[in-house]
């Protein structure tokens, strides 16, 4: 009981647990669409591209979320423009753009006189999150959940079969940029929890884990949300007792759950495939 109750006696731990669970649930929900769409690399690009936006927003006295969102969407627009105007494949364009944006962010951090801690931007600082950041994260998370819920059916068809979605009159171009905008918002929400570098794990791993466990999207959604929230809570607890990186612990727990699903999933697990009667 001491393992469970002692961390709850600290206000900063309660905040960290609640915000980590909220962001974990939001990222878990979005990760289902990311997995079906095959956008793992796109999530990586957006999460890294927000760095210069964070630094510029600080320099101009604007909210971090605004700068991060603008640069997240801007990176996506840049990727689309370069892909359309050249013969370079999309994965190569993504790699070029996100590394360029990330490098720009590193240069801006080194040249901007501020008290910005680069480590907190890269790896999060959920244990020291402020009340203003909590409010910002709650608002962004609510917007993401509302948009994914409102356009759930259209987004699902767009991820499964965009050609069919287009043939029945759905504006797939709008859905494409809607999903990318939601991705940018989720990356901003995850910025405070696990930072720029590791937020991609929260946007990919829960959906990949759930995808191994079920073939039904509704069930996949709940499994992804559940595994992501559980990973966030356990990660915060582990980081408290081991005095280690909170972001790293959260992602390691998520990775551990994925490995369990990879090995033991009823139909798609490696060990189950080798033993059909199991």
Image (cartoon, grey):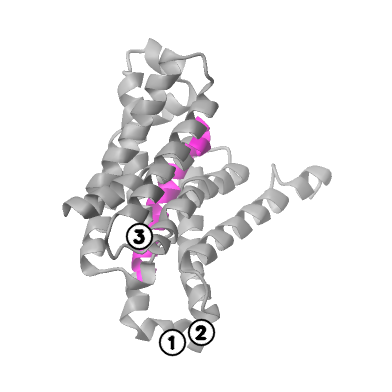
Q: Which mark is residue 3?
A: 2
Q: Is residue 154 above or below residue 5?
A: above
> Disc 1 vs disc 2: Cβ atoms closer than 8 Å?
yes
The percent coordinates of residue 74 (x first, y second) are 31, 33
First of labels 2, 3 by sequence position: 2
What separation in Å lies between label 2 and label 3 (alpha carbons)? 25 Å
Q: Is residue 207 above or below residue 75?
A: below
Q: Main secondary structure of the magenta part?
A: helix
Residue 96 visible: yes
- Between 159 and 94, the one lying in front of the other is 94
Secondary element at image label 2: helix
Residue that mark 1 sits on: 6
The residue at the point 57 percent across, 44 percent down is 208
What separation in Å lies between label 3 and label 1 (alpha carbons)? 24 Å
- Between 193 and 178, the one lying in front of the other is 193
The question of residue 113 being in magenta is answered with no
Q: Nearer the viewer, mark 2 or mark 3?
A: 3
Q: Which residues are magenta?
A: 16-41
Q: Which mark is residue 192?
A: 3
Residue 276 visible: no
């Amino acid at each position: 009981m001491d393992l469970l109750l002692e961390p709850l006696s600290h206000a900063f731990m309660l905040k960290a647990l609640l915000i980590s669970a909220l962001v974990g649930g939001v990222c878990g929900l979005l990760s289902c669409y990311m997995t079906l769409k095959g956008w793992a690399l796109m999530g990586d690009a957006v999460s890294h591209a927000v760095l210069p936006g964070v630094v510029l927003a600080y320099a101009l006295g604007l909210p971090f979320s605004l700068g991060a969102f603008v640069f997240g969407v801007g990176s996506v627009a840049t990727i689309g423009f370069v892909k359309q105007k050249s013969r370079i494949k999309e994965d190569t364009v993504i790699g070029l753009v996100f590394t360029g944006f990330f490098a720009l962010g590193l240069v801006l951090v080194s040249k901007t006189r501020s008290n910005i801690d680069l480590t907190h931007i890269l790896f999060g600082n959920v244990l020291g999150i402020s009340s203003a950041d909590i409010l910002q994260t709650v608002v962004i998370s609510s917007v993401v959940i509302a948009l994914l819920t409102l356009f759930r059916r259209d987004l699902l068809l767009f991820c499964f079969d965009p050609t069919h979605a287009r043939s029945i009159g759905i504006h797939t171009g709008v859905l494409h940029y809607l999903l990318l905008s939601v991705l940018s918002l989720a990356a901003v929400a995850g910025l405070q929890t696990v930072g720029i570098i590791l937020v991609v794990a929260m946007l990919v791993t829960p959906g990949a884990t759930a995808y191994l466990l079920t073939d039904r999207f509704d069930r996949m959604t709940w499994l992804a949300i559940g595994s992501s929230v559980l990973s966030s809570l356990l990660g915060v607890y582990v980081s408290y007792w081991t005095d280690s990186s909170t972001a790293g612990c959260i992602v390691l727990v998520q990775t551990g759950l994925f490995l369990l699903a990879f090995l033991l999933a009823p139909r798609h697990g490696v060990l189950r495939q080798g033993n059909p009667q199991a």
